[in-house]
Amino acid sequence: MDKETDWDDVETLARDVLENGAPLALTDETRALLSRTAQQVAISQRDVEDALRSVPAATTLLQEINRRIHDGSWRLTDARNRANKLRDAGDFDGAQQVMRDVLAVEVVPFYREQAEITLKTLTGLAEVRASGRLNPNLPDRPQLAALSQRVQQGQALHLTDDVCALLRRTAPTAAVSETETEEALKSPEGAEALMRMVLSRFRDGERRFLRSMYRMTSLRDAGDLEGARQQMRDVLAVEIVPQYRRMAEEQLKGLGSSPPAS
């Protein structure tokens, strides 16, 4: 679907008309845009046809399309953030309920689809934690976290081929060497320690990067570009997780500076 392009266009139109007071010109192009995007946010064809008979009604239609897009985006983003926090705390029931609450009120098909995907993922991760069996259709790191929670609940970690493969895949993403990984996989205790190391490095890296991003943005907006750059240099001075190093390097480039030499 060309939904994203349509939604960008309708947002531009809404800003011009609803915020800046520009008149709504019901050209063929505008009619087509409103008709397409109305369908994408679950407004009936009959309502669209009625609205396109006059400029005031079409303006109200534009307002409703824009509202559904923005409300749905905010609702989904907020729900995912809350669900992730509950998931990380081990409350899968609560996390799943958050997404069910979204589905109880959301009408926009795209947002419903995304909420259903998130709910399905959370249900699968809950099964991983309960059974200790991995799901090839789920992302690696959340499954690793689910296994870690299972161990914290007193369940034994079984070094199956799938579990060993998962640890071998995730260890390099946390800058753990192949030698360290293979040594850890010689025993369940070593594997548990490896699992904790991978998860803690990502958790620490995320917190470090987000804190630095907040300070960087504040300094940049205040006109202190060198201070903003220094925030990312400070991240790169200590960060070892490749993902967060790349993110810091990209921010530095965006501020017009090359990353420091490794």
Image: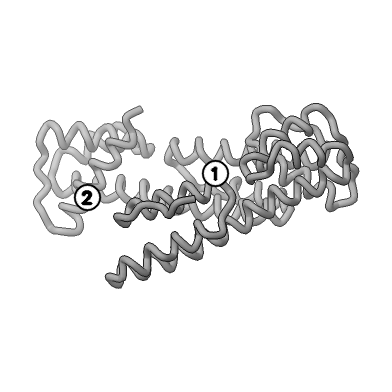
As drawn, is 83 to the left or to the right of 210?
right
Counting other residues with Cα less than 10 Å from the Cα at mark 2, is it few (<14), some (14-19), or many (20 or more)? many
In the image: residue 177, left or right of residue 57:
right
Residue 187 higher or lower than 223, as above or below: above
34 up-or-down from 60: above or below: above
The secondary element bearing badge 1 is classed as: helix
In the image, residue 30 lies at what x, y percent? Answer: 16, 37
Q: What amino acid does circle 1 point to?
A: Leu
Which residue shows up at 37% across the image and 69% down it?
Answer: 227
The mark total stands at 2
- CB atoms at circles 1 and 2 under 8 Å apart? no
Which sits in the foreground, 200 or 79? 200
Q: Quadrant of residue 141?
A: top right
Q: Nearer the viewer, mark 1 or mark 2?
A: 2
The residue sitting at 86% across, 41% down in the picture is: 157
Q: Which residue is mark 2?
A: 14
**Neighbour tally class for label 1: few under 14, some 14-19, many 20 plus, Cα within 10 Å:** some
**In this rendering, would 126 be left or right of 234?**
right
In the rendered structure, which disc, 1 or 2, sits on the residue that comes first in sequence?
A: 2
Position in image of residue 35 (x %, y %)? 25, 33
Q: Residue at x 64, y 39 (%)?
A: 172
Marks 1/2: CA distance?
26 Å
Question: Is 234 located above or below residue 6 in the figure?
Answer: below
Q: Considering depth in this image, is 171 or 100 the residue closer to the camera?
A: 171
Badge 2 amino acid:
Ala
Residues 83 and 113: in front is 83
Mark yes or no: residue 61 visible. Answer: no
